[in-house]
Image (cartoon, helix red, strand yellow):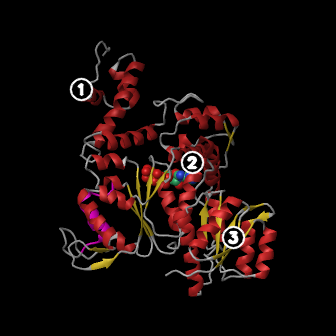
């Protein structure tokens, strides 16, 4: 049975006051509502509540300053902050000033009553420490509406253990979001461990996750703790979850259902005490449809979905991110560089197939390579491989194009990317246009083209054969 208490609400929006007080009264609490800081302070002099619920932007001041004052004067009094500002900064500021919880508007009334129950339970248990207000770097840059949606979800999940599933193209910041969820939540002093399903040989994934006993398989010379055990108390980030082999999926599902796991080759059962955050850049729905991903596991993991926008879907963040990466490069000792207006416009019109990672790489390269302190559009066009301001799908930097190609093969090619031919496939895709372009440049003269590329003429001949490049009419 949850406790009931005296709740003091501060919000200048009459509709919110009505809805909140109605819901809390129905749950058995007694509720007082106020519409301004002045009214709130008057009420506080008469009656100290058990829980305060407050908005941030108020007609006569800032709710967060009030919360900071309350945290000092009444350290035992839990405050739940409501805000429509919905940036990660607001969510974090709320915890920094000592708020017990933060709910972004619009919020779910069930979430609010749950937060009130939690606050009353904590008060009952005599905890007094506000969530510690260590100075944590805010890693996520971006103020676009699309990012605010992301911040809203992060703020909702940091104080609980719900499983989060982050989806988004490569380089959109999935790992960064997972880390933010960990760093801002109560598990922050325990480990954050990432494991990439696409990077580990399939047959080792289960041992890697759950650990193994000595002799569990050839080469298992000693007992080894798995990631579930190593991350105890913390967060486990399961990256590229769509690449998890089906047998490992079954095992993971069992762990999520039972809250326990058994090491490979061992009879020992260990309690799983980790928060799970999973990520994918593949379309999990279609993997479920095609039978490559267990539907029941999908639902277990997809409790709170976070869809990260691609960079081209939030172009208004590009300038901010670009400056952030240049500043960071300067802080790390690289020369300090600035972008002129035309350069910023060029960045904003480019399509960024490699997303924030590509932008970060280009800014670092510019910090090192550009001669002047101010970077102009012409320098960028060389980096972006495209005439300034013009972006077509083929006009992308090579590393971004290769990454995008790998993603696409992973999603669409029935062979996938783990069949042992990826190197040859990708290299020949890069090699073909290179050879064709150089042959064209040298009028079809293989000797000169080979020399220009720095390869042996016979090597070129062999590659022409293998790649079946048509050299008809080319001069020898
Ligand atoms: N919003 C952001 N603000 C600042 N830096 C960002 C942001 N998003 C991504 N980055 C940076 O971009 C790089 C790529 O991010 P991250 O590794 O989190 O992407 P990812 O989606 O997990 O990529 P992949 O799917 O390829 O693993 C990192 O260096 C990260 O710090």
Q: In this view, does 287 lie to the left or right of 1?
A: left
Q: How many angstroms separate mark 2 from mark 1 (CA)?
A: 49 Å
Q: What stretch is highlighted in magenta?
A: 197-212
Q: Name the residue under label 1.
A: 465
Q: In percent of the image, x 60 and y 64: which residue is there?
A: 103
Q: Residue 9 carries which label?
A: 3
Check contact, mark 2 vs mark 3: CB within 8 A: no
Dividing the picture into quadrants, the one containing residue 155 is bottom right
Q: In percent of the image, x 64 and y 60: which residue is there?
A: 89
Residue farthest along the top direction in this orientation: 473
Secondary structure, mark 1, is: helix
Dividing the picture into quadrants, the one containing residue 218 is bottom left
The picture places residue 286, in percent across and down from the top left corner, at 33, 45
Q: In this view, does 269 lie to the left or right of 137?
A: left
Secondary structure, mark 3, is: strand
Q: In percent of the image, x 30 and y 42: which residue is there?
A: 423
The picture places residue 2, in percent across and down from the top left corner, at 52, 80
- 204 or 63, which lies in front? 63
Looking at marks 2 and 1 on the same chain, the residue that comes earlier in the sequence is marked by 2
């Amino acid at each position: 049975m949850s406790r009931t208490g005296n709740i003091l609400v501060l919000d200048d929006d009459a509709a919110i006051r009505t809805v909140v007080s109605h819901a809390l009264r129905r749950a058995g609490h007694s509720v007082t509502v106020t519409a301004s800081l002045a009214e709130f302070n008057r009420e506080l002099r008469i009656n100290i509540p058990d829980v305060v619920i407050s908005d941030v932007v108020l007609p006569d001041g800032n709710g967060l300053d009030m919360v900071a004052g309350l945290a000092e004067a009444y350290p035992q009094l839990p405050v739940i902050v409501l805000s429509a500002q919905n940036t990660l900064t607001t969510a974090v500021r709320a915890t920094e000033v000592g708020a017990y919880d933060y709910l972004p508007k619009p919020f779910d009334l069930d979430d609010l009553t749950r937060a009130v129950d939690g606050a009353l339970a904590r008060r009952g248990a005599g905890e007094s420490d506000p969530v510690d207000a260590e100075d944590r770097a805010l890693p996520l840059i971006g103020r676009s509406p699309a990012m605010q949606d992301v911040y809203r979800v992060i703020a909702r999940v940091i104080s609980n253990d719900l499983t989060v599933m982050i989806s988004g193209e490569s380089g959109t910041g999935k790992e960064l979001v997972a880390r933010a969820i960990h760093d801002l939540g109560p598990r922050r002093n325990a480990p954050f461990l990432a494991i990439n399903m696409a990077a580990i040989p399939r047959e080792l994934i289960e041992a890697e996750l759950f650990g193994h006993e000595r002799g569990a398989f050839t080469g298992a010379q000693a007992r080894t703790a798995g990631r579930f055990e190593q991350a105890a108390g913390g967060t486990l980030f399961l990256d590229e979850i769509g690449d998890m082999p089906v047998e490992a999926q079954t095992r993971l599902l069992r762990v999520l259902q039972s809250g326990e796991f058994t090491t490979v080759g061992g009879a020992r059962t260990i309690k799983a005490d980790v928060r799970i955050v999973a990520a994918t850049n593949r379309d999990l729905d279609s993997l479920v449809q095609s039978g490559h991903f267990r539907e029941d596991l999908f639902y277990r993991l997809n409790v709170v979905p976070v869809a990260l926008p691609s960079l081209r879907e939030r172009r208004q963040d590009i300038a901010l991110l670009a400056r952030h990466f240049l500043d960071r490069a300067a802080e790390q000792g690289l020369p300090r560089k600035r972008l002129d207006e035309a350069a910023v416009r060029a960045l904003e019109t480019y399509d960024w197939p490699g997303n924030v990672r590509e932008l970060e790489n280009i800014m670092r390269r510019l910090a090192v390579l550009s001669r002047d302190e101010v970077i102009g559009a012409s320098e960028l066009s060389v980096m972006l491989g495209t005439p300034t301001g013009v972006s077509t799908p083929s006009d992308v930097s090579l590393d971004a194009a290769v990454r995008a190609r790998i993603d696409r093969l992973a999603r669409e090619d029935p062979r996938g990317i783990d069949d042992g031919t990826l190197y040859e496939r990708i290299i020949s895709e890069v090699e073909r246009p290179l050879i064709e372009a150089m042959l064209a440049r040298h009028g079809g003269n293989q000797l000169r083209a080979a020399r220009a590329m720095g390869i042996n003429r016979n090597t070129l001949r062999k590659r022409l054969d293998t790649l079946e490049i048509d050299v008809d009419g080319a001069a020898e």
